[in-house]
Amino acid sequence: MTHDSDKLDAYLQAAIDAARAGAAELERWRGKFSIREKSRADLVTEADEASQHVVKECLLSRFPEHLFIGEEDAVGQSPAAVRPTADAPPAWIVDPLDGTANYAHDVPAYCVSIGLWYAGEPLVGVILDPRQNELFFAARGRGAFLNNQPIRISRVTRIAEAMLSTGFPADYHKQLRNLKAWEKLTGVAQSLRRTGSTALSLAYVAAGRFDGYWAFDNYPWDVVAGAVLVTEAGGTLSTTDGQPFDPFRPDLVAGTPAVQRQIVELLNQNQS
């Protein structure tokens, strides 16, 4: 099965429409956070589920033969456990709310992330930030865009001039490995940031705002859409040990080709 131009157009438009529908649900639920704090976590869960429901409905109503892998359906599973088989149909890989803690505290740094995966490759990526009204989108071979304007990675080639981003898991014990990486990279990079949203961090790499990103504990729904954006904007991705990008592994390094390579080298220094 090949994906001609018309099919790719249809996939991309469906992802954009679905992201807008999901984001509208998030904003509808955000207005309910004025009630007492005790119920906030439950409302966030309901917002997640409401967003995923409309995203799934939008995508599968157009492509009922496709798979759908959403964060809300895969809680507790490892990244490898949700990998589609080699002969599987195209799979929509969706995070209906990336940046949950930000959303819960009304920090405007969260998004809907929708990626399409097929035959071992990411084909389409859409990331919509409803608070900033920023729609990032890309399809294989078509370039990357922000609100219909082309975007490219930055021209930074030296990590000493780079602004880097990273992500930490919620579990403190899982954070320790990345705290060591933070300590190592903060001594050589121009600056480090933690946005609280992997998808937005990757979109910012594609847009040239960040020069690189690394993390050890991602999930496929965090990174598939962003991977298309980064690649189509001229960037590169790999695992933290320099192997080819695999969204079903939890570790990832992305960035401009030169900065991405330097991050990998630094992360692997003094490794036994």
Image: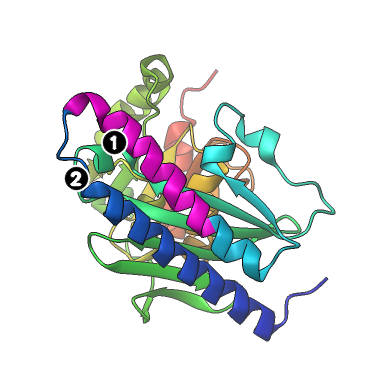
Q: Measure how far apart labels 2 and 1 are at the Cα level.
A: 8 Å
Give percent across and percent down for residue 205: 37, 58
Front-lying residue, 160 or 82: 82
Front-lying residue, 217 or 89: 89
Front-lying residue, 38 or 71: 38
Q: Residue at coordinates 61% horizontally, 37% vertically from top-left? A: 249
Q: Residue at coordinates 26% horizontally, 67% vertically from top-left? A: 133
- Looking at the image, is 13 positioned above or below residue 133? below
User: Considering only order in the chain, which callout, 1 or 2, is on the residue closer to the N terminus?
Assistant: 1
Q: Secondary structure at mark 1?
A: helix
Q: Secondary structure at mark 2?
A: loop
Graded by Cα atoms within 10 Å as few (under 14), some (14 to 19) or many (20 or more), the crowding at tag 2 reads few
- Looking at the image, is 217 positioned above or below residue 231? above
Q: Is residue 174 visible?
A: yes
Task: Tell whether label 1 touches label 2 (CB within 8 Å).
Answer: yes
Graded by Cα atoms within 10 Å as few (under 14), some (14 to 19) or many (20 or more), the crowding at tag 1 reads some
Give the residues drawn in magenta, as a range. Answer: 37-55
Figure quadrant of the C terminus? top right
Q: Quadrant of residue 21?
A: bottom left
**Residue receiving disc 1:** 101
**Residue receiving disc 2:** 107
In this picture, residue 180 sits left or right of residue 103: right
